[in-house]
Amino acid sequence: MLHPRPANTRAVSIVGTGSYMPERVMTNHELADMVDTTDEWIVSRTGMHERRIAADGEFTSDMAAEAARRAMESAGVTADDIGLLLVSTSTPDMSFPSTACLVQDMIGAENAVCFDLSAACSGFLYGLEVGQQFVGSGSVETALIIGAEKMSCITDWSDRSTCVLFGDGAGAAVLQSRGAKHGILTSVLGSDGSLGDLLMVPGGGSREPTSADTVKNKRHYIKMMGREVFKHAVTNMSEAVTATLDRCGLTIDEIDCIIPHQANARILQAIAQRVGASMDKMFINVDKYGNTSAASVIVALDEAVRAGRVKNHDLVLLVVFGAGFTWGATLLEWFEG
Ligand SMILES: CC(C)(COP(=O)(O)OP(=O)(O)OC[C@H]1O[C@@H](n2cnc3c(N)ncnc32)[C@H](O)[C@@H]1OP(=O)(O)O)[C@@H](O)C(=O)NCCC(=O)NCCS
C-alpha cells in the first residue's frame, strides 16, 4: 500500500481530459442472436444495455491517440509539451513496441518518454499515480496518461458469461503542477497476485506461446470466475474508498462525486451501500459502454466533467478494481483553470 503524499512534492492536477468511443454500438439484442442470453438477463445482472466495438481496422493506439488529442485540446497544451506519455492497457497493438510509442508517433509527442503499464482494469489509476510522481517530483512538467482498450479482440464471442460484459474505448488525462494545494490529494493502491487465476488471458505470452493448440483451445480470450470476481471487486473497492477517506480525515458525505470503474451496476450498488453513499453520488455510464477495462474510469471522469457533474473545487473519488488482482482509489480536488 502507498504512503501519504510526501510533503516535499509539488501538487499535481488533472488539467484536461478527453475520451473516444468507437461509433459501432452493439446492443444486448445482437448478443442474444449470438449466444444463449437475453436483454433482460444482461440488464438485470449487469445494468448494461449496449457497448461500443472498434472497427476492424481500428486499434487500441488509434483510440488512444484520439482521446489524447481531445485531452490535450481541453488542457490547452500541444504534443511538444508532453514529457511523459503512458498508456495503460491489456490490449496493446502488439507486444512491442509499446502502444505508448505508437501513440507518440501518431500525435507527434517527440519530447515524451513513453511506456505501457499493465494493471488491467485498474490501469488508469496506477498510471495516474505514476504520472503524479513524475510531475510532482519535477522530472517532467506535463504528463499524458491514457487508458485504452480493444477488449473485443480478447473476447470469446461464444462464451455468454464474458462476452456480454466488455467494450472498447479510450480516455486520457493531462497532468501538470499548478502550484497550489489542489489536484490529486492522495491515492491508495493495492495488489494481490495470489488471486490472479480468477480473471486472466492465459495464452499468447511466454507461459503459453501462441500455437495451433492455444488458438484451438481459445486460450487467447478472457477467462473469468464471475461470481468470485464480483465479491472481491465489492470488498476491495469499498475498502479502498474507506482507506482513502480515513487517510484524509473525510467522511463519505463530504465527497461530491464518486467515479467508479464501470464493471457492473450491481457491483456499484453494493459498494455504495457498504460505504454509505447515495447512488446519485455515483457517476454511472456502464449502461452505454459496458466494462472498457483501463479506459473505464477516465472515460467516466471525462463524461462527468463535460456534463457538469464535476465542478470547481468538488472532491472527486475515483475507485477501480481489476485482474491481478489490482485495485485502488484516488481523491482529487477538481480545479478548473
Ligand atoms: C458475470 C456476472 C454478471 C454473472 O452474474 P451472476 O449473477 O454472478 O451470475 P452467475 O455467474 O452466478 O450465473 C448465474 C446463471 O446465469 C448463467 N449465465 C451466465 N452468463 C449468462 C448470460 N450472458 N445470459 C444468460 N445466462 C447467463 C450462468 O450460466 C448461471 O447459470 P446456472 O445457474 O444454470 O449455472 C457477475 O458475476 C459479474 O459481474 N462478475 C464480475 C465481473 C467483472 O466485473 N469482471 C471484471 C472485473 S474488473
Image (cartoon, rainbow, N blue to C red):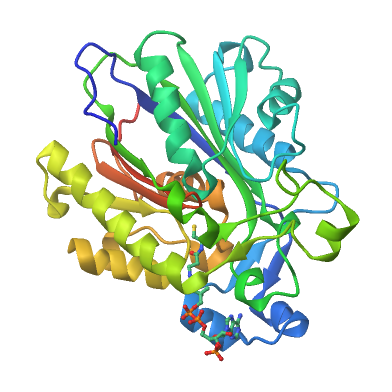
Query: What residue lies at 43% left-to-right and 16% top-to-bottom?
Result: 134
* Image coords of residue 48 (percent x, y): 53, 72
Q: How many marks?
A: 0
Q: Is residue 206 above or below residue 177?
A: below
* Image coords of residue 257 (percent x, y): 28, 51
> Is 312 left or right of 175, judged from the image as shown?
left
Which residue is nearer to you in this view: 211 or 312?
211
Most distant residue in the right direction: 212
Q: Is residue 98 above or below residue 200?
A: above
* Image coords of residue 122 (percent x, y): 46, 46
Query: What residue lies at 80% left-to-right and 65% top-to-bottom?
Result: 217
The quadrant holding residue 4 is top left
> Is 134 left or right of 293, judged from the image as shown?
left
Specify whether residue 278 is in view: no
Specify whether residue 9 is in view: yes
Q: Quadrant of the C terminus?
A: top left
* Image coords of residue 312 (percent x, y): 28, 36
Query: What residue lies at 34% left-to-right and 22% top-to-bottom?
Result: 12
Query: What residue lies at 27% left-to-right and 59% top-to-bottom?
Result: 281
> Is 95 left or right of 130, judged from the image as shown?
right
Q: Quadrant of the N terminus?
A: top left
The quadrant holding residue 311 is top left
The quadrant holding residue 59 is top right
